[in-house]
Amino acid sequence: MSEEENEKAGGIIKQSIDSVTALTKAVPIYEDAVQPLAKETGKALGTIGKAVNVALAPISLVVWGYDQMQNFLENRVAEKLEKVPEDRIITPPPNVAGPAIEALKFTGNDETLQDMFANLIANSLDSKTVLEAHPAFVDIIKSLSPDEGLILKAFSSAQQFPMVDVKLKNKKDQGFQVLHRNRSRIGIIANCKHQALTSNYLDNLCRLGILEIPSGRKINNPKEYEAITNDPGIAQLKKQFDGNETHSIDFEQKFIAVTGIGRQFINACIIDKRARD
């Protein structure tokens, strides 16, 4: 592409970004996000109000204003569209771009969530991918923690991961107690900051409809589960009950997979827009 064509394409992208930026003017920006809580509530609450103000003061530093969102749209989003031909740049659906911009007020300070919104808005500006940018995805991003975003990145190149329930089985009556539910290596693979919460993260992703654990199904290849059942913590547990006359450690094999809407969400919000063009 010639320099003249590059300038023209850049102009088209900027015009579309400007149309998105204009939406921020309709979004109420709370510059005084943290107000004194006890101005007129009496002396009894004054001390507590001051303490709460001190505790909440840092929040005002991470709530984005208009200038920050405008800079985000004109730079971060535009970068995502650098490989998109100018004839594909369109005005985005307001029910996608508007709520996404509004949500940036409170999530823009987090790099992982920020990148999801950048991809979502960029895909909504591209006629080729606009249908993938579902309005519901804004609320989904708002319901995710950064670690859950990392887990979804791990699913970008995989459809499913093995997991097990670790059970303490009673040899006499065949009853059991679940010691570890939904044990997997997903948190390690995704490099989550709080890996001990991985099972809870997966619960939330299933609640949102992004992932699912098919009932009564497992991966056919048993070797897929060896990395989980040979984990040092699990190996120690098995050793503890090795030779026990009444109880033993058993595993219920299963897997967690991406749903149809989950794959659409990953394509629109998780996979870098530039990698798709």
Image (cartoon, rainbow, N blue to C red):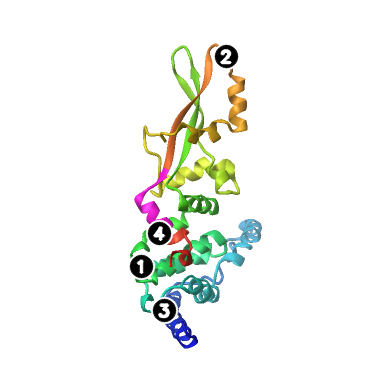
Looking at this view, name the residue that lies furthest to the front.
1
Q: Are marks 2 and 1 in contact (CB under 8 Å)?
A: no
Q: Is residue 126 above or below residue 50?
A: below
Q: Read off the residue under disc 1.
A: 130
- Categorize mark 2 by other alpha carbons within 10 Å: few (<14), some (14-19), many (20+): few
Residue that carries the numbered disc 3 in the rendered image: 16
Q: Earlier in the sequence, mark 4 or mark 2?
A: 4
Q: Amino acid at mark 2?
A: Asn
Whichever of callouts 1 and 3 sits on the residue coming sooner in the sequence is 3
Tag 1 or tag 2, which sits nearer the N-term? 1
Point out the frontmost of discs 3 and 4.
3
- Please tell me how many numbered marks the rendered image carries: 4
Query: Could you tell me how far apart the alpha carbons at marks 1 and 3 are, in whole angstroms?
Result: 14 Å
Label 4 neighbourhood size at 10 Å, few (<14), some (14-19), many (20+)? Answer: many
Where disc 2 sits, the SS reads: loop
Q: Percent position (x, y) of residue 235?
A: 60, 27
- The three-letter amino acid code for the residue at tag 1 is Val
* Residue under pointer 4: 137
Secondary structure under badge 3? helix
The amino acid type found where label 4 is placed reads Phe
For the residues labelled 2 and 1, the Cα–Cα distance comes to: 59 Å
How many residues crowd around disc 3 within 10 Å: few (fewer than 14), some, or many (20 or more)?
A: some
* 13 lies above or below 228: below
In the picture, the disc for residue 244 is 2
Q: Quadrant of residue 24?
A: bottom left
Left or right position of 139 against 110: left
Give the mark nearest the N terminus, 3 or 2. Answer: 3
Which of the two marks, 1 or 4, is nearer to us in this view?
1
* Residue 197 falls within the magenta-colored stretch: no
Judged from the image, the secondary structure of the residue bearing numbered disc 4 is helix
Measured in 3D between alpha carbons, the distance from the residue under mark 3 to the one under mark 2, in whole angstroms, is 69 Å
